Image (tube, helix red, strand yellow):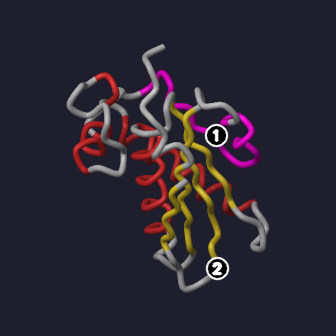
């Protein structure tokens, strides 16, 4: 697992995780909060031989995902949902989002990072956001 922290001047208020739902135990990582399933959404970089072994942490994969029609809208709507949920969650509780795709290396990683940065910016970098990429370093899964 790889963790990135976007620190705030206040406490960490949100945890966003990316997962690959085809990995054993992945469904157990979906606990509380919002769930965004990209399994059948956005272009899958794994289908492109040039991008297959890269990850959503790479600029070329991120650009590929974000250039997919509707990607920026999905991200903006998810940030808006997170902000609305934050109004309902008590201050001492973590806000959570799980972003899933098939393998957890491409789409979910890129989108989780974009949502995290959007949320962090909306909070004026005042509240911290942690991003956990659970399957980004796992081997690429066979098509299926």
Query: Against 39, is 17 above or below?
Result: below
Please, what secondary structure does the residue beneath circle 1 have? strand
Residue at 48 percent of width and 59 percent of height: 116
Query: Against 43, is 85 above or below?
Result: below
Query: Against 142, is 76 above or below?
Result: below
Q: CA distance from mark 1 to mark 2?
A: 23 Å
CB atoms at circles 1 and 2 under 8 Å apart? no
Mark 2 crowd level (few <14, some 14–19, many ≥20, 10 Å Cα): some
- The magenta span reads 26-41
Please, what secondary structure does the residue beneath circle 2 have? loop
The residue at the far front in this view is 139
Residue at 36 percent of width and 27 percent of height: 44
Residue nearer the viewer, 62 or 122: 62
Badge number at residue 23: none
Residue nearer the viewer, 31 or 49: 49
Mark closer to the chain start, 1 or 2: 2
Badge number at residue 35: 1
Residue at 54 percent of width and 45 percent of height: 18
Mark 1 crowd level (few <14, some 14–19, many ≥20, 10 Å Cα): some
Q: Quadrant of residue 30?
A: top right
Q: Is residue 135 magenta?
A: no
| Residue pointed to by mark 2 | 11
């Amino acid at each position: 697992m790889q963790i990135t922290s976007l620190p705030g001047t206040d406490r960490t208020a949100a945890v966003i995780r990316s997962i690959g739902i085809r990995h054993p135990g992945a469904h157990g990582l979906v606990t509380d909060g919002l769930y965004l399933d990209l399994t059948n959404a956005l272009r899958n970089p794994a289908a492109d031989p040039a991008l297959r072994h890269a990850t959503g942490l790479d600029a070329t994969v991120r650009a590929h995902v974000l250039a997919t029609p509707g990607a920026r809208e999905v991200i903006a709507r998810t940030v808006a949902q997170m902000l609305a949920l934050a109004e309902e969650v008590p201050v001492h509780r973590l806000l959570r989002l799980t972003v899933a795709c098939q393998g957890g290396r491409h789409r979910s990683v890129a989108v989780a990072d974009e949502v995290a940065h959007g949320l962090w910016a909306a909070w004026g970098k005042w509240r911290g956001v942690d991003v956990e990429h659970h399957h980004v370093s796992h081997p690429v899964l066979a098509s299926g």
